[in-house]
Amino acid sequence: MNIPQKYIGRFAPSPSGPLHFGSLVAALASYLDARAHGGAWLMRIEDVDEARCKSEYADDILRTLTAFGLNWDGVVMVQSQRKTAYEQALARLSKVSLTYACTCSRKEIADSALGIEGPIYPGTCRTLAMANKNNAIRVLTNDELIRFTDRAQGQGRGEISQRIESDIGDFVIKRRDGLFAYQLAVVVDDAAQGVTHVVRGADLLDSTARQIYLQQLLGFIMPQYLHVPTVTNDAGQKLSKQTLAPGIGAADAVTVIEAALRFLGQASTGANASVAGMLAAAVKNWQVSAIPGVRASAIA
Ligand SMILES: [Zn+2]
């Protein structure tokens, strides 16, 4: 693999609960990949969905990361403070007629054919030219194939591709309640932070094509993507606040990091006593090719 001249990675937790093992795995993977490339590792709080996020969780997550020795570079970017940037991106898309207002309720869309992520929006409001105010805003999509090779999930396991119009439909970039959608915020922020490498959980694998599409429309550079397997509980559910994943504490840092390394298919760092020593060894040993695959053929 070519080692890029400049590597900027990031971890972007959503503060809807305390840091749990699943998010620690994603944090560790992005940290190790950045440091193994001699790159920067930036931090971003993804609290764009203000109804679900709390600033005390953000503080708690940052404290826990620090206690785990995962020290980021530069200042923390916070999505709830970035609305002007999102508004500007939306305005750029609207100016070239790539957006439209949608008044459809969830119920009205529910009967549509099922796509990758629920009902495919059938484009009902595309040509109605309604006012943006107090309505959801969608981005116009097309059926061109969006392809990318995931650094862990793609190579040798098939390229990943999607046709957004038929797989998803025109998607919401600003919600009816005035909040910007994650898909737009993440693309604008990755570009603003100059991110070259995105390393994150595979629950976002299906979002990647939409993000690449928005990058293309906005003229942003596409980062390289690496998705690590999602951690599930005994019932097979993704760890999250909704599935009551337990928070992790600094007292168990050595055990938790060792478990996270094992989950990522990485070599054990042995019985290193200190967290700093473990992380240094893990950076040295970091092997992307050892990361397990996830449902590799599901969306090919
Ligand atoms: Zn509509």
Image (cartoon, helix red, strand yellow):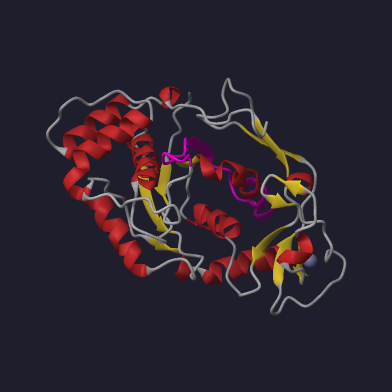
Q: In which quarter of the image is residue 88?
A: bottom right
Q: Which of 113 and 190 is in front in this view?
A: 113
Please tell me which residue is depicted at 44% across the width and 35% down the height of the picture: 5
Locate residue 278, reporting x and y percent: 21, 33
Q: Which residue lies furthest to the right in this view?
A: 127
Locate residue 29, reporting x and y percent: 38, 37
Q: Nearer the viewer, residue 293 or 220?
A: 293
Regarding residue 14, the answer to whether it shows in the image is: yes
Say which quadrant the C terminus sits in.
Answer: top right
Regarding residue 95, the answer to whether it shows in the image is: no
Give the vertical position of 291 relative to 117 (above or below). above
Q: In this view, does 31 lie to the left or right of 237?
A: left
Give the vertical position of 238 relative to 98 (above or below). above
Please tell me which residue is depicted at 59% across the width and 56% down the height of the picture: 183
Total number of numbered discs in the rendering: 0
Q: Nearer the viewer, residue 46 or 215?
A: 46
Q: Is residue 16 left or right of residue 164?
A: left
Q: Is residue 300 left or right of residue 109?
A: left
Check residue 156 for magenta coloring: no
Q: In which quarter of the image is residue 27?
A: top left
Locate residue 143, reporting x and y percent: 80, 44
Write the start and end of the magenta stretch as one range: 212-236
Which quarter holds ligand 1?
bottom right
Give the vertical position of 167 relative to 182 (above or below). above
Please tell me which residue is depicted at 31% across the width and 50% down the height of the picture: 72
Locate residue 122, reporting x and y percent: 82, 56
Please tell me which residue is depicted at 49% across the width and 70% down the height of the picture: 51
Q: Residue furthest front?
A: 235
Q: Which of 200 and 249 is in front in this view?
A: 249
